[in-house]
Image (tube, rainbow, N blue to C red):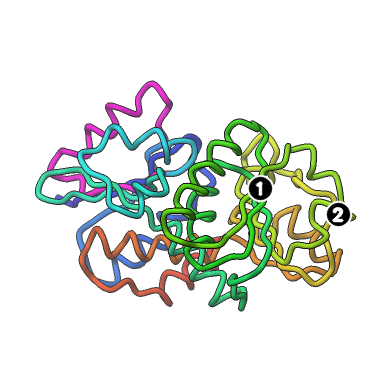
């Protein structure tokens, strides 16, 4: 009988994780199946409890549960605790332990695929949810010069900014943190001094209510900057199409997805992730 790993979220039908994770599992001839576990909010607690069954080895966690899943776990590792978001659950001595591999996946993709070094630059972050939290902390830990955070819920942006500011102070870092209302996305002034825009909402994601939309219009995107959309399906989102027309460099979310998935794979299996195989399968199906 096989063991199981799954993706917990709502919705999850847009995900390609089963394809590249299964390719990695099959590479090692492991009798493990990676599945989609679409879970409505009222069933989240029972879904997490089900991970304790012996055939379940762990899970990935995606929107909208990266923050709400924390109190359902036995332990949370240091990085995930700092970020206050979990995207990977693994068993350790019969305990459910939460990890965050999004932060590492984000920065690895930024450097390896975006050819971009964040130290000292000014960045604008669109969104303040679980992915945005990982992105912000990853950038701060890599000495970004400034972060401007915008979310549709202003209080959410403010809470994230306050949390990051406390960390910046405690760690002796110099990153400047600012918050702007979401309406500021309509102004070119918001972006005129930045070198990096990172989009961390589901706008433009396949099967989302806003799947054909972009959070920005092309006329506010500066030429020559990097626009990084963590949405991976479609590979070239409406935002990235506009950014390309505006003369910006672009980076989609597929590399981040694969790199974070590779880190998750190693947490579950203890084996080195076959990253090239995972990339090939992800690019084949997306």
**Seen in the image, is 207 located left or right of residue 82?**
right
- Sort mark 1 into few (<14), some (14-19) or many (20+) by Cα contacts within 10 Å: some
Of 74 and 208, nearer the camera is 74
Looking at the picture, does residue 9 appear above or below residue 124?
A: above
| Start-end of magenta stretch | 39-61
Mark 1 highlights which residue? 178
> Helix, strand or loop at disc 1?
strand
Of 271 and 127, nearer the camera is 127
Extreme residue toward the top, this view: 42
Q: Position of residue 138 (x, y in %)?
A: 49, 60
Q: CA distance from mark 2 to mark 1?
A: 19 Å
Q: Which mark is residue 220?
A: 2
> Helix, strand or loop at disc 2?
helix
Residue under the point 42% across and 63% down: 20
Residue under the point 55% across and 48% down: 132
Q: Is residue 283 magenta?
A: no
Tell how many labels. Answer: 2
Residue under the point 46% across and 64% down: 105
Please state which of the two labelled residues, at mark 2 or mark 1, is closer to the viewer. Answer: 1
Quarter of the view holding residue 266:
bottom left
**Seen in the image, is 42 located left or right of residue 5?**
right
Looking at the picture, does residue 285 appear above or below residue 188?
A: below
Q: Are marks 2 and 1 in contact (CB under 8 Å)?
A: no
Quadrant (top left/top right/bottom left/bottom right) for the C terminus: bottom right
Residue under the point 48% across and 73% down: 280
Q: Position of residue 31 (x, y in %)?
A: 20, 59
Of 186 and 88, nearer the camera is 186
Q: Position of residue 48 (x, y in %)?
A: 27, 34
Q: Which mark is residue 30?
A: none
């Amino acid at each position: 009988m096989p063991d199981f790993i799954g993706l917990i979220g709502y919705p999850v039908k847009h995900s390609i994780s089963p394809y590249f994770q299964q390719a990695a599992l099959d590479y090692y001839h492991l009798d493990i199946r990676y599945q989609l576990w679409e879970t409505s909010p009222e069933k989240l607690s029972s879904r997490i409890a089900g991970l304790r069954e012996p055939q379940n080895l762990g899970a990935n966690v995606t929107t909208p549960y990266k923050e709400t899943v924390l109190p359902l776990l036995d332990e949370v590792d240091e990085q995930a605790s700092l970020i206050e978001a979990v995207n990977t659950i693994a068993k350790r001595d019969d305990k459910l332990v939460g990890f965050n591999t999004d932060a590492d996946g984000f920065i690895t993709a930024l450097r390896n695929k975006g050819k971009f070094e964040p130290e000292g630059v000014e960045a604008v972050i669109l969104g303040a949810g679980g992915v945005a939290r990982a992105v912000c902390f990853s950038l701060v830990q890599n000495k970004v010069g400034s972060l401007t955070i915008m979310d549709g819920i202003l209080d959410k942006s403010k809470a994230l900014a306050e949390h990051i500011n406390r960390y910046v102070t405690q760690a002796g870092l110099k990153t400047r943190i600012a918050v702007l209302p979401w309406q500021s996305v309509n102004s070119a002034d918001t972006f005129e001094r930045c070198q990096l825009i990172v989009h961390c909402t589901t706008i433009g994601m396949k099967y989302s209510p806003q799947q054909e939309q972009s959070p920005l219009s092309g006329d506010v995107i500066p030429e020559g900057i990097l626009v990084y959309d963590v949405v991976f399906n479609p590979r070239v989102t409406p935002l990235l199409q506009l950014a390309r027309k505006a003369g910006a460099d672009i980076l989609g979310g597929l590399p981040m997805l694969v790199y974070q998935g590779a880190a998750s794979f190693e947490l579950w299996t203890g084996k080195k992730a076959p990253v090239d195989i995972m990339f090939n399968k992800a690019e084949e199906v997306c």
